């Protein structure tokens, strides 16, 4: 007994020594020194729940000036899920667990294995909704496209939350801060068919540590598909998709890839690795945050988090603040199990009410995608690497030169407003809804993809995405235990306008993009998806309901807003990420977006984390 007591005392002393001493670049730090000792209660200035995209970014910045602990349910994905999450080409097809079907192949060391409630508007399907359960969070399993939202969208964000500092010009420094851009390697790309155009002034040479770069290889199938999109009326942008405009154009977009080795750059490889070297950040891996602890003042203050590592319960206390960055489904879950949420939900599970916040778990925005595909007469990265005759050569090219098909992931996107010929067919209610958005916000987005089909054929796919759904879903709990999965209602097509837009998008793909001269030249045989039998509007609606897929951009379940919107359930955090009704607690991640930022969200998640980190340091 005595010796184990001494041991605990010694370990506690070690942990607090690590936590207390301020960051020092001069001293060499052991890698192992960055990890907490499970089972030992410890105290830090800030405790960040979730070592994901936002959590690691924010923690790394805070750790430059304060003691910080990260609580993360997963571990290092490079160690635990092999190379599929590291090699760009494998980011979609190599990670079998991204499959949205209920019958997906689970990967418990990288994914939460969340399965939604039956989606009423989508033929009652239950959707497996991939979410990173690993250091880096969803940045460790996403498809890596790096694009930014629009000027108008950020202006809308500023309006909704009543804070000008969310306008584009004010956000741009934060968008720049997290990323380091490497210009395209044109020799490695070896293609005139995929011209990269970008705006250098949209990046800061001093930005980082996230790496953003262009694929070191161009997929020949994507090259002609990009031309087809161009022939359908969406020419290449002359500044790319990082400068605040998206509509009416296409772009070869960069990805979060480290160009030197052509490996995934995630919040873990960038922010965490840097923090381990340069700060005294402490990470608790394979550790589940079970409850946020509050003192019982009239304004309850978050004092720490009770956690569990492999069955061991202990407490991590925060001298200053607890920051929840557990992602769009788990952040609201953690608030709910801790007594912060709609009173009715809390009471139904006998959870003591800390703060009545009706909006926790509400306002789920979840854009969807719909596919049209054909066989193509060109080869693709997926085919070249699936073919035993060519794969070894490309593997060697990847290892020696960081180029070739393995180095590359997708890369061409386009966006537009619904074109007039389709717009005129929309109901006036739908038009009125669309008109509530700024002019520069895309209503339809296209993503090109190429896959391997039977007998090493190439399957070419264009997906249409509706970035601003009008339907809302929700997240709630059916248990007081954070180890049980949250209950997710995606709400797809709850609003008819979404089905109408999806139908317009599907027709645009089939009638225009897939019908352009260049697409007709390269497509082979009959349409594979939906298939020639799907012709009437009724059949197409049915196809959409049966096949709509997530694009994993869910957000806004702890929406940022104004104090006057709290009661209506429209706001959970203020424009500093502070949870209304309590003290010492923030939510900073995709759940705090006021709405789904058109474009792809990761740039905004990093920027938000940078912004709130600066906020916290300024107010400390
Ligand atoms: C398959 C996929 C493809 C995508 N493709 C793109 C793309 O190409 N471009 C783009 O811009 N965006 C893309 N996205 C979206 C983007 O990656 C996410 O919006 C973003 O990463 C979310 O960041 P976050 O910080 O909100 O959450 P996450 O990065 O998911 O982090 C949440 C973290 O919290 C941890 N956690 C949760 N609960 C607990 C708990 N109770 N205790 C301890 N830890 C906990 C999780 O394990 C996780 O590490 C994609 C997402 C997915 C899933
Ligand atoms: C850790 O904290 C918890 C909760 O405050 C307490 O019950 C427990 O005894 C503490 N453990 C140790 C080893 O001090
Ligand atoms: C990934 O790992 C597998 C072994 O699990 C190996 O066969 C394959 O060549 C690797 N691919 C790359 C691109 O590293
Ligand atoms: C560049 O592309 C050409 C034509 O597609 C091809 O013949 C050549 O081998 C490529 N060069 C390299 C270095 O890959
Ligand atoms: C694949 O090849 C086999 C043998 O040549 C052939 O019978 C089959 O029809 C082919 N399948 C497709 C989809 O091309």
Image: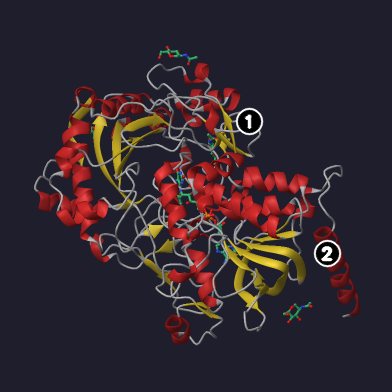
Q: Position of residue 492 (x, y in %)?
A: 29, 60
Q: How many marks?
A: 2
Vertical side of 263 occupied by 274: above or below: below
Give the structural element (helix, strand or loop) at label 2: helix
- Kindly indicate whether the residue at mark 1 contacts the one at mark 2 (C-beta within 8 angstroms): no
Q: Position of residue 207 (x, y in %)?
A: 63, 36
Question: In the drawing, what numbered circle is on residue 176?
Answer: none
**Residue for point 40% across, 22% down:** 194
Quadrant in which the C terminus appears:
bottom right
Q: Position of residue 219 (x, y in %)?
A: 39, 26
Q: Nearer the viewer, residue 297 or 413?
A: 297
Q: Earlier in the sequence, mark 2 or mark 1?
A: 2
Q: Nearer the viewer, residue 574 or 550?
A: 574
**Residue for point 36% across, 56% down:** 366
- State the image quarter where residue 579 is shown: bottom right
> How far is mark 2 from mark 1, CA to CA?
36 Å
Instruction: Kindly tell me whether mark 2's CB lies below 8 Å from ligand 2.
Output: no
Disc 2 residue crowd, few under 14, some 14–19, many 20+, Cα 10 Å: some
Horizontal side, residue 268 vs residue 3: left or right: left
Residue at the disc numbered 1: 205
Ligand 4 sits in which quadrant? top left
Residue at the disc numbered 2: 16
Specify whether residue 278 is in view. Answer: yes
Specify whether residue 150 is in view. Answer: no
Q: Nearer the viewer, residue 257 or 2?
A: 257
Vertical side of 59 occupied by 310: above or below: below
Give the structural element (helix, strand or loop) at label 1: loop
Vertical side of 224 occupied by 434: above or below: below
Quadrant in which the N terminus appears:
bottom right
Q: Nearer the viewer, residue 41 or 248?
A: 248
How is the model colour-coded? Answer: secondary structure
- State the image quarter where residue 277 is shown: top right
């Amino acid at each position: 007994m005595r010796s184990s007591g001494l041991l605990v005392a010694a370990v506690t002393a070690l942990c607090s020594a690590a936590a207390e001493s301020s960051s020092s670049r001069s001293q060499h730090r052991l890698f192992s020194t960055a990890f907490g000792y499970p089972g030992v209660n410890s105290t830090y200035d800030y405790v960040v729940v979730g070592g994901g995209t936002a959590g690691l970014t924010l923690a790394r910045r805070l750790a430059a000036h304060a003691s910080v602990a990260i609580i993360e349910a997963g571990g290092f994905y490079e160690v635990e899920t092999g190379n599929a999450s590291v090699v760009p080409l494998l980011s979609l097809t190599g990670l079998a667990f991204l499959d949205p079907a209920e019958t997906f192949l689970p990967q418990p060391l990288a994914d939460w294995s969340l399965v939604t409630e039956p989606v009423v508007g989508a033929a009652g399907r239950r959707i497996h909704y991939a979410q990173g359960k690993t250091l880096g969070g969803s940045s460790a399993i996403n498809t890596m496209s790096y694009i930014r939202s629009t000027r108008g969208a950020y202006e809308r964000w500023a309006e909704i939350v009543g804070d000008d500092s969310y306008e584009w010009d004010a956000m741009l420094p934060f968008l720049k801060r997290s990323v380091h851009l490497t210009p395209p390697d044109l020799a490695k790309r070896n293609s005139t068919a995929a011209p990269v155009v970008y705006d250098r002034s949209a990046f800061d040479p001093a930005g980082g540590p996230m790496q953003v770069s262009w694929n070191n290889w161009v997929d020949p199938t994507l090259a002609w598909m990009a031309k087809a999109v161009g022939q359908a009326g969406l020419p290449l942008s002359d500044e790319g998709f990082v400068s605040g405009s998206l509509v009416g154009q296409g772009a070869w977009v960069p990805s979060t890839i480290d160009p030197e080795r052509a490996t995934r750059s995630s919040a873990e490889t960038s922010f965490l690795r840097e923090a381990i070297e340069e700060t005294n950040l402490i990470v608790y891996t394979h550790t589940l945050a079970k409850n946020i602890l509050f003192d019982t003042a009239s304004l309850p203050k978050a004092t720490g988090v009770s956690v569990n590592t492999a069955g061991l319960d202990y407490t991590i206390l925060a001298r200053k603040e607890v920051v929840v960055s557990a992602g769009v489904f788990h952040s609201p879950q953690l608030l709910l199990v801790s007594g912060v949420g709609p009173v009715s939900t809390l009471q139904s599970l006998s959870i003591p009410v800390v703060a009545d916040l009706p909006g926790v778990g509400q306002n789920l925005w979840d854009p969807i995608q719909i596919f049209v595909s054909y066989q193509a007469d060109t080869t693709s990265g997926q085919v070249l690497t699936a073919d035993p005759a060519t794969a070894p050569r490309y593997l060697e090219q990847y290892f020696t030169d960081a180029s070739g098909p393995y180095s590359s992931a997708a890369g061409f996107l386009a966006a537009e407003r619904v074109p007039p010929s389709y717009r005129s067919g929309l109901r006036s209610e739908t038009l009125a809804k669309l008109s509530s958005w700024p002019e520069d916000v895309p209503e339809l987005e296209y993503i090109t993809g190429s896959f391997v089909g039977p007998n090493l054929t190439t399957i070419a796919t264009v997906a249409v995405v509706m970035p601003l759904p009008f339907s809302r879903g929700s997240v709630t709990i059916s248990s007081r235990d954070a180890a049980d999965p949250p209950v997710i209602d995606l709400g797809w097509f709850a609003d008819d306008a979404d089905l109408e837009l999806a139908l317009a998008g599907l027709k645009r793909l089939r009638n225009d993009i897939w019908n352009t001269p260049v697409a007709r030249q390269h497509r082979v045989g009959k349409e594979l998806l939906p298939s020639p039998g799907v012709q009437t509007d009724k059949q197409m609606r049915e196809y959409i309901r049966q096949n709509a897929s997530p694009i994993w951009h869910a957000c806004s379940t702890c929406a940022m807003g104004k104090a006057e919107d709290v009661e209506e359930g429209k706001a959970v955090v203020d424009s500093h990420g502070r949870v209304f009704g309590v003290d010492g607690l923030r939510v900073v991640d995709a759940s705090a977006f006021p709405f789904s930022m058109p474009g792809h969200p990761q740039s905004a998640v990093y920027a938000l984390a940078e912004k709130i980190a600066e906020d916290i340091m300024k107010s400390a």
